[in-house]
Image: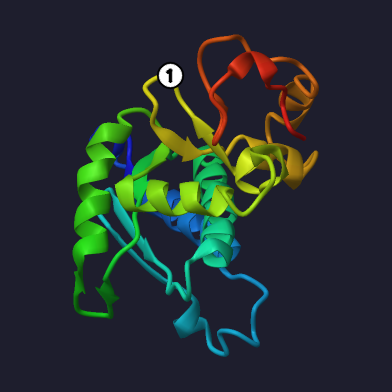
Amino acid sequence: MDMLGYKEMWCHAEREGSQDTFLQRLYEALKEGQEWLLPNDNDVWPTEKDRYALKAFTDNIVIGWPVRGDGESELGSIFSNIAFFQLRMATNGFFLRGAISLGDAYVDDVVVLGSAFLEAYQGEAQARNPRIILTDTANAAVRKHLTYYSHPHYAPQYSDLYQDSDEKCFVNYLETILAAGEECPFFEELSKTQGQHYPTTGTIPFGLKDSSQIHLGC
């Protein structure tokens, strides 16, 4: 993932002599967002180090999670955690774009490498807007997981992911405003859209093709 407008924000801070303030705001945003990356799975991942890896450098953020089996459970947690992370960064003034991929990866205090990161890096350019999209490997995995349900509406991915007009699937982070409650900015505005139908063009829940059938699944 990268932060949109980072260069302009940093140059503005330099001109204003407010580099320390900018650094503190960015640090606090990352720290606040990081709290949502810790799942309640002490039995599965006994130490924090096992659960995820996060690296931030300049305007780039890399997050890695271990995946077991076919990855449905882990991807479900990842989509939710990424959505809250993206929301917390956005409410602090840092909008993210990026990509989610599946594959080999290695992260430690010295190096970040692997095919998963390369695919995510390439996919990031296709995100364009402040979206975190699915690359081919993640997309294929989720489409397989949807076959486990009698109808996509019953799958948790139904509200976690949306498919945009360019057919790119992305994490629906705005849905987390409703989950976060009244303490979150924009809660009142978004809550007014509950039950409203989406137009026949634009975003639709992932796994469905006819947006005329769709309403906000809250």
> Residue 68 or 19: which is nearer the viewer?
68
Mark 1 is surrounded, within 10 Å at the Cα level, by few (under 14), some (14 to 19) or many (20 or more) other residues, namely few
Identified at 48% across, 74% down, the residue is 69
- The quarter holding residue 132 reads top left
Left or right: where does residue 58 sit relative to residue 97?
left
- x, y percent for residue 28: 50, 56
Identified at 57% across, 49% down, the residue is 147
Identified at 44% across, 72% down, the residue is 67
Three-letter residue code for mark 1? Ser
Left or right: where does residue 134 sit relative to residue 58?
right
**What residue is disc 1 on?**
165
Residue 74 shows up from this direction: yes
Left or right: where does residue 55 sit relative to residue 170?
left
- x, y percent for residue 98: 34, 44
Residue 16 shows up from this direction: no
> Residue 162 or 50: which is nearer the viewer?
162
